[in-house]
Image (tube, helix red, strand yellow):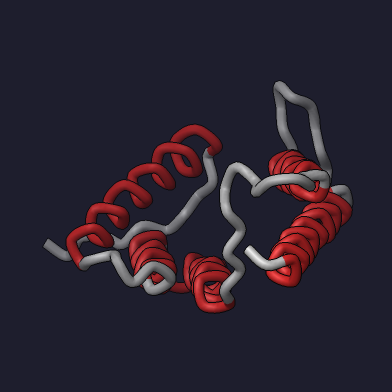
Amino acid sequence: MAPDEDRHSALKNRLCAAVLVAVGLAITVEALGFRLGSVARMGPGMFPAILGVLLALCGAAMWFVRDGAPAVPVRATLRPVLHVLGAMLAFALSVEPLGLLPATAALVAIAGLADPEHTWRSLTGLFVVATAAVLVVFVQLIGIPLRLPVCPF
């Protein structure tokens, strides 16, 4: 690799690391506006605060990778990022008015566009697994009342 390519790659890695740190810190600061609670009885701000800190720490670790490539190659393309962010936004905006199943279907379909190697079969399997995980974690364990469609039969 030419020296200019090395410099360009290092700059891209540093830029990605800085974005991760900034987003992680922003999430953490926003989460601190909610009640954190305790470990035994977590409040609504605990989980986002933990994820924000972890994201910032990952970015900080990535910042210090100097000689040699990081363990996971950083390939920053806009398409996957936009699809994943759009999928999360679609889920957040549609889960309350439409219910869990249509919101999860929208999440999986839009996020699936980020990877052109996905097939409808793999996305259907992902939809089933994601729906089951959301039902178990959020509805059963945490007790969030998500609206489920009623079977007309």
Q: Report how many numbered discs are placed on residues in the image.
A: 0
Residue occupying image coordinates x 52% and y 68%: 84
Residue 60: tell me if it is visible: yes
Query: Residue 93 versus residue 53: which sits nearer the camera?
Result: 53
Residue 150's x, y, as percent?
27, 60
Query: Residue 121 versus residue 67: which sits nearer the camera?
Result: 67
Q: Quadrant of the N terminus?
A: bottom right
Is residue 40 found left or right of 124 in the rendered image? right
Residue occupying image coordinates x 38% and y 67%: 115
Is residue 36 found left or right of 100 in the rendered image? right
Q: Which residue is the extreme one toward the left?
A: 153
Residue occupying image coordinates x 21% and y 67%: 120
Residue 109's x, y, as percent?
35, 70
Residue occupying image coordinates x 35% and y 51%: 131
Residue 49: tell me if it is visible: no
Image quadrant where residue 20 sits: bottom right
Residue 58's x, y, as percent?
73, 44
Q: Quadrant of the C terminus?
A: bottom left
Query: Residue 99 versus residue 128: which sits nearer the camera?
Result: 128
Residue 27's x, y, as percent?
79, 56
